[in-house]
Image (cartoon, rainbow, N blue to C red):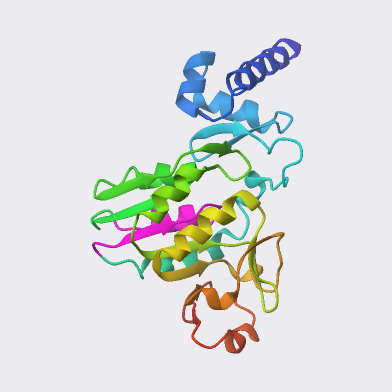
Amino acid sequence: MRTMSYRRVERLAMLATALEAGGSLRLKEAAKMLGVSEMTVRRDIATGDGSLTYLGGYIVAGQETPGGMGYLFATELASHTEKKRDACTLAASLIEPGDTVFLDCGTTMPHLASRIPTDLRLTVVCYAINVAEILCKKPNLKVVLLGGIYHPSSATFSSEEALGTLANIGINKAFISAGGLHADRGVSCSNFHEVPIKRAAMQNAVRRIVVLDSTKFGRVKPAFIGQIDDFDTVVSDAAVPAPWRETLPPGVRLLMPAP
């Protein structure tokens, strides 16, 4: 038992060293580097100290550098999954052939990415690894992945170059994720570095659509994205609290599955 424990610690140390320069490591590459199975690597990470996280086929640092927001991406992966799926099924129905769409980051957007039909031809702009990995497996999509500095807390990239790229892309529909939607404090998220990209996509989009599960209504997160009426559509699941069904600002449409 002590030998196996030592080997696990040694493997985790090797992974941490490989990630010291930042970025991420594919699970397959990690398994090959360590000379073990992918299942062993995932088990090592799951039983480790939390400094490493497995998400979307990649191994990344488990949290942001000191001083960051501390939004632990992995803890959100399995939360409210059915609600996220329901909201994203409805959101996907808004996408039309030939569209250029922006897909935001977070743990909701992979459900939307997976629900884009494989025979649909369109261009998708994204900046999150867990979203891009799903999109790149769909042969009829043209995927634009924005680059820059990698942020493990949300598996995203950010840079001035990314903002410049967005400014030159005409977007039919921008699907924005959020951690909170509040009548007075508007739409918000946990990571400040995401806000410029979200706003740039919204500014260049014909339609601005916020996609979030019903547990986010009434919440406020630290990073302000915009007021509710900066969006034309709010997409959620069937459990949206009753007061919200009547109190959204004029001109903002609420889409939710039929009961």
Q: Which residue is more in the foreground, 27 or 211?
A: 211
Residue drawn at x 42%, y 68% as measured from the top left: 91
Q: Which residues are magenta?
A: 97-117
Please give left or right for residue 126 compared with residue 246 in the image. left
Q: Which residue is more in the foreground, 186 or 237?
A: 186
Residue drawn at x 72%, y 59% as measured from the top left: 222
Residue 212 x %, y %? 56, 66
Residue drawn at x 50%, y 72% as measured from the top left: 235
Is-magenta flag for residue 111? yes
The answer to whether residue 238 shows anywhere in this view is no
Residue 163 x %, y %? 47, 50
Q: Quadrant of residue 61?
A: top right
Is-magenta flag for residue 137? no
Q: Quadrant of residue 136?
A: top left
Q: Is residue 149 above or below residue 118?
A: above
Residue 197 x %, y %? 51, 54
The answer to whether residue 241 shows anywhere in this view is yes
Q: Which residue is more in the foreground, 166 or 81?
A: 166
Q: Is residue 232 above or below residue 173?
A: below
Q: Could you tell me which quadrant the N terminus lies in?
A: top right
Please give left or right for residue 193 compared with residue 112 in the image. right
Residue 207 x %, y %? 40, 71
Residue drawn at x 34%, y 58% as measured from the top left: 116
Residue at the top extreme of this rendering: 3
Please give left or right for residue 56 compared with residue 168 in the image. right
